[in-house]
Image (spheres, rainbow, N blue to C red):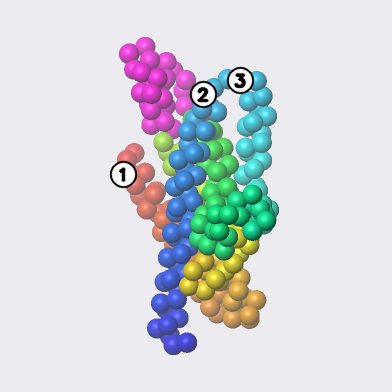
């Protein structure tokens, strides 16, 4: 393959990585932020156990997630009729599961650190429950954004689940991490190292943009 061909393939791989990881992070955020908020402001029996479980799941191994998703989406699995195994959709499912407990747990921590008087003061001034909740979320927004960034960092760097449910198909489900694994196994350390540096630059660039945004907001 020519240098231009390799360059185009690298951009293609980067596109798949970003599309899958950003989509999974967005979906996880839509579920995790409300869940983490409700967990922080609610009182119920077994809350400590739920918090412990969610926190423990932050370290969920990627290969375990890949195996579970593979079983669910395989032809003999309960969701096999969807026919999405070895597609980007399957990879998004796996990364969604990985990001979910991270963003939930860190959102819980961020909201728990907000002074409870913020919500009570808002309600005493006539704010609706939704408005009071929004005030609490605004107060804890820096921690919540950090939670989302941590979730994205977790999924864009994972490899076990992506290979197991994506199949590492060239031009379709091959990501930066799965390509690094493949090229290293083939002994092509130069390309593997180059892709590793690109992955690092992409992750750092996104984090820098978020931190810059937070700095301006502050």
Foreground mark, 2 or 3, reads 3
Vertical placement of residue 154 versus 44, above or below: below
Residue 205 versus residue 104 in the image, above or below: below
- Give the number of callouts: 3
- Sooner in the amino-acid sequence: mark 3 or mark 1: 3
Q: Is residue 126 part of the magenta span, yes or no?
A: yes
Most common secondary structure along the magenta stretch:
helix
Q: Report the disc number at residue 44.
A: 3
The residue at which mark 2 appears reads as: 41
> Is 114 on the left or on the right of 69, as rendered?
left
Give the alpha-carbon distance from disc 2 to disc 3, as whole Å. 10 Å
Q: Which mark is residue 216?
A: 1
At horizontal 52% and vertical 42% (from top left) the residue drawn is: 103
Q: Nearer the viewer, residue 162 or 131?
A: 162
Question: Residue drawn at (62%, 32%), measured in percent from left and top?
Answer: 51
- Which one is in front in this view, the residue at disc 3 or the one at disc 1? 3
Q: Residues within 10 Å of mark 3 (few under 14, many from 20)?
A: few
The answer to whether mark 2 and mark 3 are in CB contact below 8 A is: no
Out of 145 and 186, give the one closest to the viewer: 186
């Amino acid at each position: 393959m020519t240098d231009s061909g390799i360059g185009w393939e690298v951009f293609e791989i980067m596109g798949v990585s970003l599309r899958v990881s950003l989509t999974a992070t967005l979906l996880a955020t839509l579920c995790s932020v409300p869940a983490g908020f409700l967990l922080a402001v609610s009182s119920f029996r077994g809350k400590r156990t739920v918090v412990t479980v969610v926190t423990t799941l932050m370290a969920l191994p990627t290969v375990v997630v890949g195996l579970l998703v593979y079983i669910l989406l395989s032809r003999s699995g309960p969701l096999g009729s969807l026919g999405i195994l070895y597609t980007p959709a399957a990879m998004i499912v796996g990364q969604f599961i990985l990001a979910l407990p991270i963003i939930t747990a860190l959102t819980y921590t961020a909201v728990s650190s907000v002074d409870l008087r913020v919500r009570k003061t808002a309600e005493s001034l006539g704010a609706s429950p939704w408005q009071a909740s929004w005030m609490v979320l605004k107060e804890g927004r820096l921690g919540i954004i950090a939670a989302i960034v941590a979730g994205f960092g977790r999924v864009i760097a994972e490899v076990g689940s992506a290979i197991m449910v994506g199949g590492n198909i060239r031009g379709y489900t091959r990501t930066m991490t799965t390509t690094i694994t493949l090229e290293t196994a083939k002994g092509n350390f130069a390309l593997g190292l180059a892709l590793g540096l690109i992955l690092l630059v992409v992750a750092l660039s996104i984090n820098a943009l978020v931190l810059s945004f937070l700095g301006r907001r502050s």
